[in-house]
Amino acid sequence: MVRRLAPLLFLLLLFPGLSGAELTDSRRDLIRSLFPSATTIEEKLSDVPVYPVYQLQELLGYAYESTDLSRLQGFAGKPIRMMIGLDTQGRFTGVEVLHHHEPVFLHGLGEEPLFEFVDQYEGRSLREQIVVQSSYAGKQGKTSDGDVVYFDGVSKATVSVLIINDTVLSSALKVARQKLEAFAQTTPTRARPDFFEPLGWQALIDRGFIGHARISADDVEQQLGRPLSDYPVNMEPTSVLPSPSYSSPI
């Protein structure tokens, strides 16, 4: 998908004004590539830097630039800038690389392995544990329990792809916690100091916080369903077993 959007990405890089908060036609086309059924893309919100995306009146999700929410530095010492789409269920609709300085992709392997790596996010959920493996691990896709998803890494670019993964997941989690109801964090329970009231011993008794009870042997036997005489009087162990030991056969 990034390959098809190369002219749009070139414009974003050529004209710095296009890469700001303004929702230009080029940026709309880029976001629409992440949400093909979108009919309306709104301006970036002021509280959370995301672009709401709608199909008619239905909210499809949000698109955002990774660097607005995460400034993790890549191998080259600069953030890898991406446009990320996240639907209302916490699934990635796609990830597009906008700009990077990673030397392994610029002067070594070429950018195709980078694009292939980020393509793996499409359709994956924040509820899944995404693990980036080496290109030699041989394990791909989802595990049988459905909780862990293995991504193919890129040989000779381990640091870069791990930074990309951390950037994608950490930024998406910030958006989800603030914009998606299913991921919203509940307010932590805190003691209310205005409810504190010092109480003396008699006050605790009067309010039922402290009580006194007398239990007879008959009451205990009735609850246990058997006489107390069935239980040994002396509960101490009759003997002490020697501690286990290990001897080398040598």
Image (tube, grey):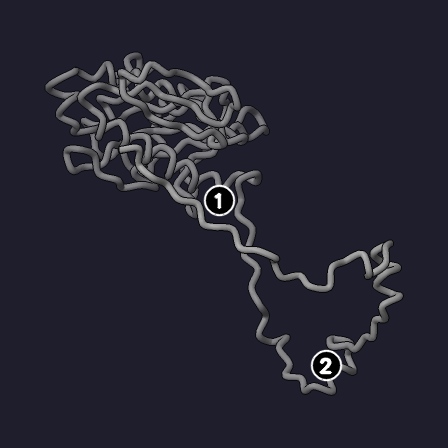
- Taking the spot 83% from the left edge, 63% from the top edge, the residue there is 220
Residue 89 is left or right of residue 51, and the answer is right
Name the foreground residue: 36 vs 123. Answer: 123
Crowding at dot 2, Cα within 10 Å, few <14 / some 14-19 / many 20+, comes out as few
Placement of the N terminus among the 4 image quadrants: top left
Residue at 46% x, 17% y is 36
Question: Mark 2 = which residue?
Answer: 204
Q: Which residue is mark 1?
A: 178
Q: Position of residue 149 (x, y in %)?
A: 43, 23
The quadrant of the image that shows the C terminus is: top left
Left or right: residue 1 compared with residue 181: left
Nearer to the camera, 186 or 249 = 249
Q: Amino acid at mark 1?
A: Gln
| Marks 1 and 2, the one that precedes in the sequence | 1
Image vertical order of residue 195 relative to residue 148, above or below:
below
Find the distance from the CA under tag 1 to the CA under tag 2. 43 Å
Q: Amino acid at mark 2?
A: Leu
